[in-house]
Amino acid sequence: MQETIVDLIRHGEPVGGRMFRGSGCDHPLNAHGWQQMRAALGDAAPWDQILTSPMARCREFALELAVRHHLPLAVEPQLCEVGMGRWEGRRPTEVAAAEPDAFADFLRDPLMHRPPEGERLEHLRARIGNAYDRQLAAWPGRHLLIVCHAGVTRALMGHLLNADALGWWRMRVDYAGLARIRHGQHGASIEYFNAERIRPLNG
């Protein structure tokens, strides 16, 4: 059985800085965000296919990378970030001041206390898991790069590890943080998570 290698990279810092930015805020990367992404990948181009979230903070860098290295690119709509409902585009300090009880409940138990009209974590994990499995089946034995989001990366780890949502949601994913998953005859192996630099396949 040929191994399938999947690299994940979270987008860099978007315009506007830190806020609740889910599927409802389509901000592009700022200059520092572009720098973070380029520093994380350097001149590496080992992939057979690039997949990206449709959101600008992922898609625009993925397109630039694909054009620069002459790599095929596909937009996967189901890889958009978790919906944050009525908290979209608001800073945590703003929400904490305006809705202190709801914000405290969210921090304590983000599974049961989602932002108003926000996407449920069970739905997020199912959505990401289905999209990932479909793409994995389409590219057996290949090396893929997925450009996505913190919530998407967390949900995928939950899917692969069959982990409880309260566990995987609390995983920290830095801007331009990298992960690698190796799929072999014994299943999936997470080789690294939240790394600052892409690593060689035999490194």
Image (tube, rainbow, N blue to C red):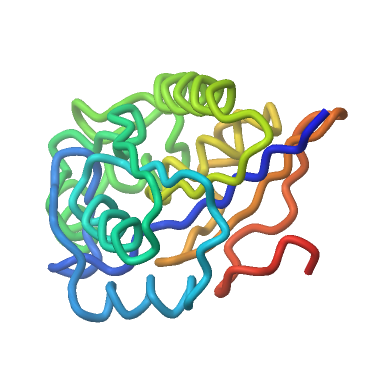
33 or 94, nearer to the observer: 33
- 20 vs 109: above or below: below
Question: What residue is shown at x 57% (from left), y 59% (from top)?
Answer: 46
Along the horizontal axis of the image, is 193 left or right of 188?
Answer: left
Percent across and percent down for residue 170 are 53, 49
Along the horizontal axis of the image, is 50 left or right of 88?
Answer: right
Percent across and percent down for residue 157 are 60, 39
Figure disc tally: 0
Percent across and percent down for residue 111 are 45, 30
- 130 vs 8: above or below: above
- Extreme right residue here? 186
Question: What residue is shown at x 50% (from left), y 20% (from top)?
Answer: 134
Question: What residue is shown at x 13% (from left), y 56% (from top)?
Answer: 27
Along the horizontal axis of the image, is 152 left or right of 180?
Answer: left
79 or 82, nearer to the observer: 79
**Quarter of the image with the N terminus in it:** top right
Along the horizontal axis of the image, is 36 left or right of 13?
Answer: right
Quarter of the image for residue 19 reads bottom left
**Quarter of the image with the C terminus in it:** bottom right
Quarter of the image for residue 160 reads top right
Question: What residue is shown at x 26% (from left), y 55% (from top)?
Answer: 63
